[in-house]
Structures are given as C-alpha cells and as structure tokens.
Image (tube, rainbow, N blue to C red):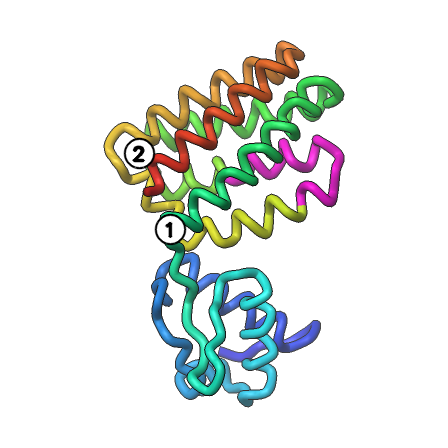
C-alpha cells in the first residue's frame, strides 16, 4: 500500500485509526512500528508523528521508552466520557428542536428511515454507522462548532468498544425506540423533551457499553 497527498503523517494516522476502529488493532495491542512501516512503505518519522496525532485523540497511549499501544477504556473512563457527552448532546438536541430548519429536520428523518432499515436487516455495522451519522447531524445542526468538536473527540474514544454494545441482545431494538422518540421530539419542536430523551438515551448507551 502506498500513500500520497496532504501531510503524510495524517494519511498514516487515518490508516491506523481505521485499524483500531475495525479492531484489527485491539485495545491494549502494542503498535508494531516495523510492521506498519513495511506495510505502508514509509519511514518511522511520519509514523511517529501519526502516533502523536492518535495519542492526542486518546486512541493511543504512549509509554516512555516502551512505545505506544491502543488505549484500553476502563469502566470509570466510560462513565466519565458518557457523563460529559450526555450533557452536551442533550443540549444539542434542545438547540435543534428549537432552531433547526425544516430542511435539517427532513434530513434527520431520512437518516432515521435508513436506520430503521438497518435494524430490520440486522445490519449491525450499518446501524452503527447510521447511528453515528444521526448524532453527528444533530451536533452539526445545533450550530455550536466548539461543542461539536468536544463531542467528536470523546466519541472517538468510545469507538474503541462502542460497536460491541449494539451486539447485546435487545440493544439495537431499544436504541431504535429511543431514536424514534428523539426524532419525534425534534420534529415536534419540543426542546425540553428532546433534551431529556437524548440525555436518557446516552445513559442507556453507557449501561450497554459496560
């Protein structure tokens, strides 16, 4: 595999990030620099810059004189992350219900229709991606780029194990019900209800992730 365009270390970071999200590199796994440099046909310098990028995102943990490994998310980490995300995303839902355009609400409705289909088809990977898209759009339509950046950074870390929670019996169905309720509150222009439902939805997600 060869890489080109934009700063090389960012392309390398993209490749490693995807390996982490696909669990080709599992939590706790050490980053094998020799193996990656040979696979991507690169030197160690841009690889180490890429590792710094991923460490800043919380996906990789660096150990002095030992190397770097994929971050392991502990139960206390999950609780802390979900606490912050639930507050911020609840506010985003409030803002969307209050201020989103009709076109933005229509976009959310269309994404949710695809989410329903993924659930019906038992397409867990598709459901995971569409679930992420639904939440991303709410953050985008809320119109606060700083809040969105914080949420996205935290969700990067959750991706280390988040997909597995959807494989738990009944979680996809429950998540879908919660999404329907959130969408209904958004379309119905009910900010307080949307805020409460989103907060509850994310706390349920935390329980499923443990």
Q: Earlier in the sequence, mark 1 or mark 2?
A: 2
| Disc number for residue 46 | none
- x and y percentages locating residue 137 in the rendered image: 63, 35
Above or below for 90 versus 144: above
SS state under label 1? loop
From the image, tell me which residue sits under label 2: 122
Residue 33 or residue 2, whichever sits in front: 33
From the image, tell me which residue sits under label 1: 161
- x and y percentages locating residue 37 in the rendered image: 48, 85
Task: Identify which residue is drawn at 59% across, 52% down.
Answer: 153
Above or below for 138 versus 35: above
Above or below for 123 versus 194: below
Task: Identify which residue is drawn at 43% across, 41% down.
Answer: 128
Q: Is residue 139 magenta?
A: yes
Horizontally, is 156 left or right of 32 in the view? right
- When asked about the image quadrant of residue 87, the answer is top right
Task: Identify which residue is drawn at 62% across, 35% down.
Answer: 88
Q: Which residues are magenta?
A: 132-148
Task: Identify which residue is drawn at 59% across, 87% down.
Answer: 45
Residue 66 in view of the camera: yes
- x and y percentages locating residue 160 in the rendered image: 41, 55
SS state under label 2? loop
- x and y percentages locating residue 205 in the rendered image: 41, 34
């Amino acid at each position: 595999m060869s890489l080109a365009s934009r700063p090389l270390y960012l392309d390398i970071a993209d490749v490693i990030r995807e390996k982490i999200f696909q669990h080709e590199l599992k939590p706790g796994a050490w980053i094998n620099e020799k193996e990656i440099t040979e696979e991507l046909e690169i030197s160690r310098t841009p690889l180490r810059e890429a590792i710094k990028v991923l460490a800043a995102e919380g996906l990789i943990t660096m150990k002095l004189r030992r190397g770097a490994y994929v971050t392991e998310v502990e139960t206390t980490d999950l609780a802390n992350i979900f606490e912050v995300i639930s507050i911020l995303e609840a506010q985003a839902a409030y803002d969307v219900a209050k201020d989103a355009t009709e076109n933005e609400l229509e976009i959310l409705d269309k994404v949710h229709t695809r989410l329903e289909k993924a659930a019906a088809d038992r397409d867990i990977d598709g459901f995971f991606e569409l679930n992420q898209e639904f939440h991303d759009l709410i953050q985008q339509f809320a119109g606060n780029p700083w809040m969105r950046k914080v949420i996205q950074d935290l969700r990067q870390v959750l991706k280390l194990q988040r997909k597995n929670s959807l494989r738990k019996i009944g979680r996809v169905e429950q998540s879908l019900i919660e999404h329907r309720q959130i969408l209904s509150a958004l379309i119905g222009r009910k900010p307080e209800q949307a805020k409460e439902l989103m907060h509850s939805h994310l706390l349920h997600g935390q329980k499923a992730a443990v």
